[in-house]
Structure formats: structure tokens, C-alpha cells
């Protein structure tokens, strides 16, 4: 479907910009809102309009002007002062329920464009991950001047080597795993910890290596139950006598499927994963007779104040977004690649995920240390003795 263009494209005509935060919340969102708003106000005299609850605000015309005071003192705050929504895709928006109880979806992109036109917004700053950029794509195609900023704790947005929110999530997960380590050692237990990571296991991999976890299960490498059991048995009987297992929520057994907690038919992305941690814990207990405990960090990884590295990253991303906008950029996503900030075509990144290559350097280093990824490649005997490729 083609939509008529709603915005002027000349940077000289940009006097009012809108900003929204889409998808799940994460540490650093307020840091980005702060730098975008303050830079726009102080450097260019531009008015900034906050759009509430992501694209829902565009659909329902819920916007409010942001003052300098509104965006002061929010650098360290978690969450987002604008609110967010990970159930709202304007292209496929649940508008009603059919007689049989099934959801009825409609394309409300024209409504979003009308809201932008009505509020005289000249450009849109959209903060989010692959889902949010997919939601923004029809607006870009309609001629709306959109600049994207990469946000997701999963670090899986295609086109950038890092997203803000990820480093804080890894720090939180690592601290939790460190605490589980002392309990596992004291009680001679196997501790299984489930972390977020639906299709990309960056949190599990990075926090697992940082905490010295013994088994790291990620979606990119299907695991074998017997390989995990053999590894754990060796650690329990001939090694340290305990084991730490970190599991991404999207991990799955070889030839098997991901663990689905529930399905929400009214959501544009209806599948909700969950339960793999308990599934792995039960399997290890059954196959090894070890005492096993499971912890799921879940939304704990999304909350709290951003660490210093994420505050700096968010500040750089936000500043770059306003800078390229005022240089005439349209339909771009700000990124960092090889530690250099730049930008790419937003449409190229929309709906694409950055997965972990199975030959990633961190995986190779972890295998050399005796870490198991639940497969037979580089399988070691519980971290005791030299590794042998089977």
C-alpha cells in the first residue's frame, strides 16, 4: 500500500521533532531522550514532542511537548519517561475481536501519518530494536523523515555491533551468576539460570563468559542432552563438584523446538517464550542425579539504572541521530561499527536480527577454557583435563 508523504525533507524546515520509544523498555532510554531533546533545543532551537507509549501514541494521538526541565535529571533513570509498548504494530494492529473470539487486524499506518501531520511534526526519532524499526519502515516508505536509534538488551539489531541497554543487562546477569556461583560451590549443586535472548544469545554468551559459567546454551547452537549430562557428571564427580549453567530463553535441543510459555493471538508477535531453564534443570537432575536449582532472571535484566558504558553509548547515539538529521539525512539508523559511529539505511535493518556466528571469537575462547555449549564440538570432560574434539 502506498501512503502520501506527510513531511518536508529539507533540514532547514525542521522546527519540531517527535520522539518515541518502542518495544520493551531497557536501561538507557531516558539517556537517549535527554540527549536528543537537549541537543535539539540548545543547538538548533527545535521543539521536541514526546509520543507516549510508542506507536500507540501515534495511533491514539497522545503526544506532549517536552521542556528542558522534563528531560533534566533523567540520565540515570531506568525505563522511559514516555512509556513504551511492544504489542503495537501499526501495520498489523488489533482493532477488534471477531464473533469467534479471534483478533481482527488492520493497517492503521494512515492514522499515524495523520497524527504526525496534525501535530506538525517535521521528523521522527524512533528508539527501538528490530521490531520497532519494522514498525517504522512503512512510515519511511511513505516519505516520513525517520531517524532510528538502536535499542535492545538482546544486542540483536542488524547493522550495528552494539545496542544500548545490552551492557547493563550483561552486568546484571553477570552479577546474578556470580552470586549463584557461591551457592553452587557451597552446596555442591548445579545452578541453572535462564536469561533473555529469543533468537540471539548475546546476553547468555557474554554474561556466561564473564561469570565463568560452565555450560552456555544459546539459540544459535542446539544442545544435546547427553552431552550436557556427561559434562555435568564429570564436574560433579571428578572436578569442582558444582556447575553453573546459563540458558538463553530461545535455546532448544538438537532437532527440538523452543519452549513456548504462552501465545497471545492479539499481539503482532504472538509467541512468548519461557520455561527452557526449568526444562534443562529437570533434564540434568534426571540424567545425573545431581541436586539442581533453577533461577529465571526475566525482566530483571530490563530494569534499573544504566551503567556508565550504556549512558555514554546512549549519549553518542542520540547526539549522532540529531546531527545527521540536521545534515539532511532521512530514513537512517544510527549505528556503531568497529567502534565508529555512523548510520545505515533503516529499511535494510528493519526486521532483521544480528545472530551470533557459531565461530565467534568469544565462543572459540570459551571452548578453549573448557566451557560447554551443549554440543559435541570441543566437548570437554567437565573442565578437567585436556579437551578432545568428538
Image: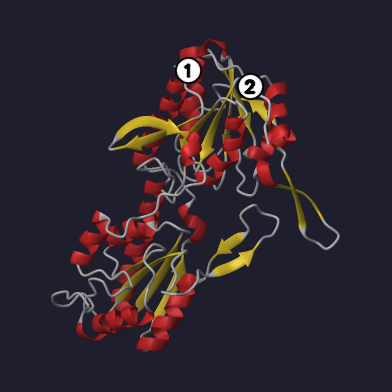
The x, y position of residue 217, in whole percent, is 37, 67
Q: Residue furthest left?
A: 386
Q: Taking 31 as reference, is 247 above or below it?
A: below
**Circle number at residue 121:** 2
Seen from the viewer's position, the closer of residues 111 and 54 is: 111
Q: Residue furthest top?
A: 12
**Circle number at residue 151:** none
Q: Secondary structure at mark 2?
A: loop
Quarter of image, res 10:
top right
Please state if 362 lies on the left or on the right of 74 as rendered.
left
Residue 81 in sight from this viewpoint:
no
Q: In the rendered view of the protein, which quadrant contains the N terminus?
A: top right
Seen from the viewer's position, the closer of residues 244 and 8 is: 8
Please state if 331 lies on the left or on the right of 93 as rendered.
left
Tell me the distance, in whole angstroms, between the alpha carbons under discs 2 and 1. Answer: 16 Å
Q: Residue furthest right?
A: 99
Residue at (53%, 28%) from the top-left corner?
A: 71
Q: Residues within 10 Å of mark 1 (few under 14, many from 20)?
A: few
Q: Residues within 10 Å of mark 2 (few under 14, many from 20)?
A: many
Q: Residue under circle 1?
A: 328
Q: Taking 119 as reference, is 210 above or below it?
A: below
Residue at (62%, 20%) from the top-left corner?
A: 7
Residue at (41%, 35%) from the top-left corner?
A: 314
Amino acid at each position: 500500500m502506498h501512503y502520501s508523504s506527510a513531511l518536508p525533507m529539507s533540514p532547514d524546515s525542521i522546527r519540531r521533532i517527535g520522539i518515541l520509544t518502542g518495544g520493551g523498555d531497557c536501561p538507557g532510554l531516558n539517556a537517549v531522550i535527554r540527549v536528543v531533546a537537549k541537543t535539539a533545543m540548545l543547538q538548533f532551537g527545535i521543539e521536541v514532542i514526546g509520543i507516549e507509549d510508542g506507536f500507540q501514541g501515534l495511533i491514539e494521538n497522545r503526544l506532549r511537548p517536552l521542556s528542558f526541565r522534563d528531560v533534566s535529571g533523567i540520565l540515570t533513570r531506568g525505563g522511559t519517561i514516555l512509556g513504551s509498548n511492544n504489542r503495537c504494530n501499526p501495520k498489523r494492529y488489533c482493532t477488534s475481536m471477531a464473533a469467534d473470539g479471534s483478533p481482527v487486524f488492520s493497517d492503521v499506518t494512515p492514522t499515524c501519518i495523520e497524527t504526525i501531520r496534525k501535530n506538525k511534526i517535521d521528523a521522527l526519532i524512533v528508539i527501538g530494536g528490530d521490531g520497532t524499526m519494522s514498525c517504522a519502515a512503512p512510515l519511511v516508505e511513505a516519505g516520513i523523515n525517520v531517524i532510528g536509534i538502536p535499542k535492545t538488551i538482546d544486542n540483536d539489531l542488524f547493522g550495528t555491533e552494539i545496542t544500548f541497554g545490552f551492557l547493563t543487562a550483561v552486568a546484571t546477569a553477570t552479577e546474578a551468576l556470580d552470586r549463584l556461583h557461591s551457592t553452587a560451590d557451597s552446596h555442591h549443586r548445579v545452578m541453572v539460570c535462564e536469561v533473555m535472548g529469543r533468537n540471539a544469545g548475546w546476553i547468555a554468551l557474554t554474561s556466561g563468559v564473564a561469570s565463568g559459567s560452565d555450560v552456555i546454551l544459546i539459540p544459535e547452537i542446539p544442545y544435546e542432552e547427553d552431552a550436557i549430562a556427561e559434562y555435568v557428571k564429570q564436574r560433579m564427580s571428578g572436578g569442582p563438584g558444582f556447575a553453573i549453567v546459563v540458558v538463553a530463553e530461545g535455546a532448544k535441543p538438537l532437532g527440538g523446538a523452543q519452549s513456548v510459555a504462552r501465545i497471545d493471538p492479539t499481539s503482532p508477535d504472538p509467541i512468548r517464550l519461557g520455561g527452557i531453564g526449568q526444562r534443562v534443570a529437570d533434564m540434568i537432575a534426571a540424567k545425573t542425579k545431581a541436586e539442581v536449582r533453577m533461577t529465571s532472571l526475566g525482566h530483571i535484566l530490563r530494569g534499573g539504572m544504566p551503567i556508565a558504558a550504556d549512558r555514554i553509548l546512549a549519549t553518542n547515539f542520540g547526539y549522532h541521530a540529531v546531527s545527521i538529521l540536521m545534515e539532511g539525512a532521512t530514513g537512517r539508523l544510527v549505528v556503531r561499527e568497529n567502534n565508529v559511529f555512523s548510520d545505515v539505511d533503516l529499511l535494510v535493518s528493519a526486521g532483521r536480527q544480528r545472530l551470533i556466528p557459531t565461530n565467534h571469537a568469544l565462543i572459540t575462547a570459551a571452548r578453549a577454557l573448557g566451557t560447554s555449549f551443549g554440543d559435541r564440538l570441543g566437548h570437554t570432560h567437565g573442565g578437567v583435563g585436556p579437551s578432545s574434539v568428538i
